[in-house]
Image (spheres, rainbow, N blue to C red):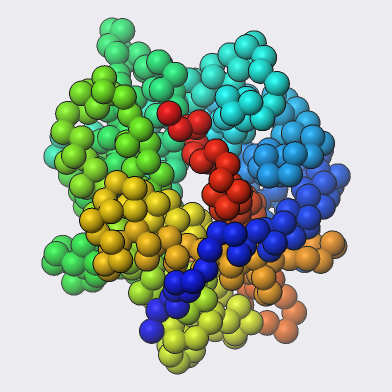
Amino acid sequence: MMLAIDESLRPEDLLEPIRRMWEVSGEKILSIEATCRNRAGAPVFTVRGQYQAQGWTEWTEGFRFGSALLQFDATGDEQFLEIGRTATIERMAPHLTHTGVHDHGFNNVSTYGNLRRLMREDRIPHDWRELELYELALKVSGAVQATRWTVTADGDGFIYSFNGPHSLFSDTIRSLRSLVLAHRLGHRLIGENDAPISLLDRWAQHLRTTARYNVYYGEGRDAYDVPGRVAHESLFNPNNGQYRCPSTQQGFSPFSTWTRGLAWIMLGFAEELEFLADLNETDQDQLGDRSELEAIMLQAATATCDFYIRNTPTDGVPYWDTAAPGLVQLGDYLNRPADPFNDFEPVDSSAAAIAAQGLLRLGRYLSARHPDRGNSETGGRRYWQAGLTVLRTLLGDPYLSTDSQHQGLLLHAIYHRPRGWDYVPEGSRIPRGEACLWGDYHLREVALYVQRVARNEAYYTFYGPVS
């Protein structure tokens, strides 16, 4: 079967579950701050309900402090504004000039970006010096992110991952936010001999390269070319930019779909489509054929969202990889709700939280920009209702953590199944019952998104307010 979309569900129907979520969310943020304040390393995932650091890259610190800012945004409780603002100033500066990662959109847009947005929305008092600080930080972040650049043989390029210049990650599409925020603030990268480098152009190139190589369209590219399938990583020969093959760091196989990588693609293309639609005429002229870029992005967004709908259990929560070897033991697992308590393969609720927002944003975009599609297979309403359906699942049992002793908000998330980093509780054969910072952050973010829509408040975008 596939995700069972509830066509009758409305954003207003989720306001009470969202309110309950914010209640437990605030307790968990305060608990993390009380226990992790002076600990080395950013908290990443929970073990027996307590957040732990995990050295690989420090890509989750922005989600920690960004969560406090989302909590303030949703509830108006100023203690969370103080946590998020103070920690951003005191702790996030090294992330602005971090040249070794592809994570700027995660760390810096979630902190400096949220603070800038809140001030521009008049949610916090306007202080031009403070705003100037946030905007300077975002300019630096976008330019530094854009320096991690590999040129491909077909004339485009991409921001390469922490693996090196040969590696294009699907995750990185969400870091493109740092480039376009810096561009929108009038910034550009300066290269050798003072050569100006357009951040908007690198944004567009990375979008095209990701759509071309990390997303499949059923066109016979290889024996496993299923429409909407996503490769976690694409490998290139750095000597000449030639594409070599798909790969993965956290999935089961290069020829299957790691579902969190799929979710990053879904959300990344959907929110960048919104940004594309909001560009001014000067920026559109700089991009060349805007309609061609939109068509590429729409193809990638709809293909991946359709794949998610087809390959996810009825309640909207996916297993961690579509070809995980233990799935065969679960029988007809797509024809019933996901089972996080099974003995063979874990689900990944964090992928669901990211995907839900992607489905919602794509649905709204299509309904506004392409209403002619109506209720067709690729119509906006179908994706919108699918996103609401997934969110409703995550806001209840067994996913929302209401135990005050558990620091996680969204249970049954997976970080790195192949490396065995996720905690397996006694009596279980697979990881379950734990949370991760990106899962918690994205549940808060999609809840805030739907809350604003339901209350007819300002539309939430990373670059907002919408012009």
Would residue 373 be found to the left or right of residue 101 on screen? Answer: left
Task: Inspect this view and state whether residue 443 appears.
Answer: yes
At 18% from the left and 39% from the top, the residue drawn is: 291
Number of marks = 0
Where on the picture, by quarter, is residue 166?
Answer: top left
Looking at the picture, how far across and down is residue 142, in whole percent? 44, 26
* Along the viewing direction, whichever of 71 and 442 lies nearer the viewer: 71
The residue under the point 22% across, 23% down is 286
Picture residue at 60% right of the left edge, 78% below the top: 340
Residue 69 is left or right of residue 31, and the answer is: left
The answer to whether residue 56 is visible is no
Q: Residue furthest front?
A: 456
Q: Nearer the viewer, residue 366 or 223?
A: 366
Spot occupied by residue 134 in the image (x, y as percentages of width and height): 59, 21
Residue 172 vertical position relative to residue 463 in the rendered view, above or below: below
Compared with 146, 427 (above or below) is below
Report the residue that reaches farthest toward the top.
Answer: 193
Q: Position of residue 255 (x, y in %)?
A: 30, 68
Which quadrant is home to the N terminus?
bottom left
Horizontal and vertical percent position of residue 400: 69, 66
Q: Out of 105 and 281, give the one closest to the viewer.
A: 281
In which quadrant of the rendered view does residue 194 lie?
A: top left
- Front residue of 231 and 348: 348
* Placement of the C terminus among the 4 image quadrants: top left
Q: Residue at the spot x=26%, y=67% of the render? A: 376
Q: Considering only vertical position in the picture, is 398 above or below 146?
A: below
